[in-house]
Image (cartoon, rainbow, N blue to C red):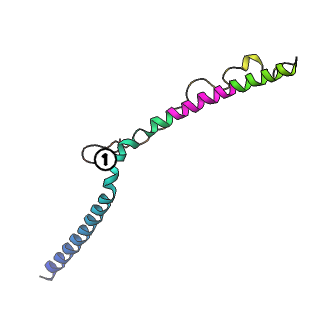
Amino acid sequence: MGSLQSQLNDISKTLTTMAAQIHDLARKFDTLEPLIPLAKKLNGIPDRVTQMQASVFEYTEQVHALHLVVQRVEQAQRGCTSAPTTPPDQIGPSRPSGPPPPFPRVGRFVPNESGSAFH
């Protein structure tokens, strides 16, 4: 009978531990639940970062081209007959054309009806 009492005590301790863990999970969920609607907005961030990188790349190329134009105008105003600082064949983009590589996507968070999921 002592063995049965020992088993009942072990079961009681296990149930008490499980109840504490469930209470802790419920508290954490209550804390995070208001943030669930924001997850949908955060989902689009990688795409926006990629778009921003492409825009910055494009604007950098435009600034480079404007810099070359300003150099030539300044040289023309000074009456310099020397060659421009950049050869004509290098007036175009100084880097490979096209947008930068896409933002890496590892474990995208996509909320579903049950709460949340990582894909």
Tell me the element at label 1: loop
Q: What secondary structure do most residues of the magenta stretch adopt?
A: helix
- Using the image, determine if residue 56 lies above or below residue 114: above
Residue at 78% x, 24% y is 71
For label 1, the residue is 116
> Does the magenta-highlighted stretch encompass residue 4?
no
> Quarter holding the C terminus?
top left
Residue 38 picture location, percent across and down: 36, 47
> Residue lying furthest left in this view?
1
Horizontally, is 8 left or right of 72 in the view? Answer: left
> Residue lying furthest bottom in this view?
2
> Does the magenta-highlighted stretch encompass residue 56?
yes
Residue 45 picture location, percent across and down: 44, 40
Can you tell which quarter of the image residue 87 is in?
A: top right
Horizontally, is 97 left or right of 83 in the view? Answer: left
Q: Is residue 100 visible?
A: no
Q: Is residue 66 visible?
A: yes
- Amino acid type, mark 1: Ser
Viewer-nearest residue: 94 or 37 = 37
Residue at 19% x, 72% y is 11
Residue 61 picture location, percent across and down: 64, 27
| Image: magenta residue range | 51-64
Q: Residues within 10 Å of mark 1 (few under 14, many from 20)?
A: few
- Using the image, determine if residue 62 lies above or below residue 81: below
Viewer-nearest residue: 66 or 31 = 66
Residue at 81% x, 20% y is 84
Residue at 86% x, 22% y is 78
> Residue lying furthest front in this view?
77
Residue 5 picture location, percent across and down: 15, 80
> Quarter holding the N terminus?
bottom left
Viewer-nearest residue: 57 or 59 = 59
- Using the image, determine if residue 58 lies above or below residue 83: below
